[in-house]
Amino acid sequence: MPSPKSTLDDLVVAIYDAALDPSSWQQCYVGMSSLVGAKSMLATLQDPAQGHASLLASNLDPKFLQEYATGWWTKDPWALGALRHERGKAYVISSIVPDAHYVGSEIYNDLVRPHADCRFCLGTIVDVDGSLGVMGFHRPSMASDFSHADRHLLQRLIPYIQQSLRIERRLATQNGARQTALAAFDSLSFGLAVVDSACRPLLMNRVAEACLGSATGKLGGRSHQPLRVENRMETQKLHLLVHEATGRRIASAGAMKITRRASDLPLMLLVSPLVGRHASLLGVAKPAALILIQGFNQPVPPERILGDLFGLTIAETKLAELLAQGARLEDVAIERSVKMSTLRSQLKSILQKTDTDRQASLVRLLTQLSIRTNTRDD
């Protein structure tokens, strides 16, 4: 039989593994139940402000869990009692809610007795980024109450449980944002490819993929090989633009034309660094560049380019276009009857979103992106 120390060590490893695989929480809590001599357990992640609770793990009767989730969890004297005590501490709950009080409670007589024999409880509540991790381990009425030694064992595991739950929650948030970004990335009407410093593709949307392959005049190369085009000089130029974009790590861009068959119009490629939150959102950790692929017969409106590449709003796009044409903020304020404070706020947002440090860098970027639309006619 393993020693208590080796059992604790194994549980700590399993608890951190659960941050990456939430389905393994069940086995973790089964192991913890065995460690403290509990017959049943229940762990939930609760958001009292939203009136919502989700199940982490349990081996209780599904009927009990269903009714508990419909509202009983807000009336649980064990949980309510623990809420009045320090978070992250293990409690033998009879020290918080006397056994006589619990046995006479509504939840015990209407829910617990018909579906589960959970007379004694060892539990804790931990803070998880605005939510509460509420967990309890139970013994039946014919057993003895939990001891302080049991409480000490659980206390040793609580910091690991809390940290793992926080990691899981943050990973879920990041993954959700990344999936949304990738879905938007793939739905664009023009090609976008994310490549590393050697011009090897990391991500491509459906339009960019349609341009890949061995056909004459199209971008080519397998996913583990650098992108190439039919013309060797154009391939070299593309690789140079990507190398410069990933090496300098500033908000600059290069443009080039890719020639195709005589029956096809050429492709326009815009190459920009992919840095900061844009890279993080797409899950790209290494130095990378963003390649926009567009046919010359399919003009891209500036609001689409700036909105899709940098997330600029319509108002920010209009201001950026005017600045690219050489207008001063003072001129824009007078012409559009907008306060200078509003324009400065919009400019600050534009600089942040485009990762430029000053207005001159922004104008250079917009010029390289060929933002030429005249907005002074509206």
Image (cartoon, rainbow, N blue to C red):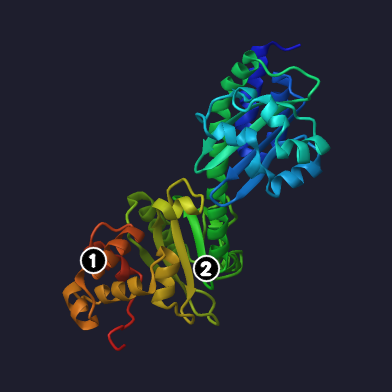
Q: Secondary structure at mark 2?
A: strand
Label 1 to label 2: alpha-carbon separation: 33 Å
Q: Quadrant of residue 121?
A: top right
x and y, in percent, of residue 259 in the image: 48, 73
Residue marked by disc 1: 344
Q: Residue at 22% of width from left, 77% of height from top?
A: 332
Q: Earlier in the sequence, mark 1 or mark 2?
A: 2
Amino acid type, callout 2? Gly
Q: Quadrant of residue 63?
A: top right
Left or right: 48, with 60 as reference point: left
Q: Residue 28: in sight, yes or no?
A: no
Q: Nearer the viewer, residue 318 or 112?
A: 112
Across the whole image, how many numbered discs are drawn on residues? 2
Q: Residue 156: in sight, yes or no?
A: yes
Residue marked by disc 2: 191
Q: Residue at 58% of width from left, 32% of height from top?
A: 81
Q: Secondary structure at mark 1?
A: helix
Q: Residues within 10 Å of mark 1 (few under 14, many from 20)?
A: few
State the quadrant of the N terminus: top right
Mark 1 or 2: in front is: 1
Q: Residues within 10 Å of mark 2 (few under 14, many from 20)?
A: many
Q: Nearer the viewer, residue 196 or 22?
A: 22
x and y, in percent, of residue 46 in the image: 60, 43
x and y, in percent, of residue 368 in the image: 32, 69
Amino acid type, callout 1? Arg
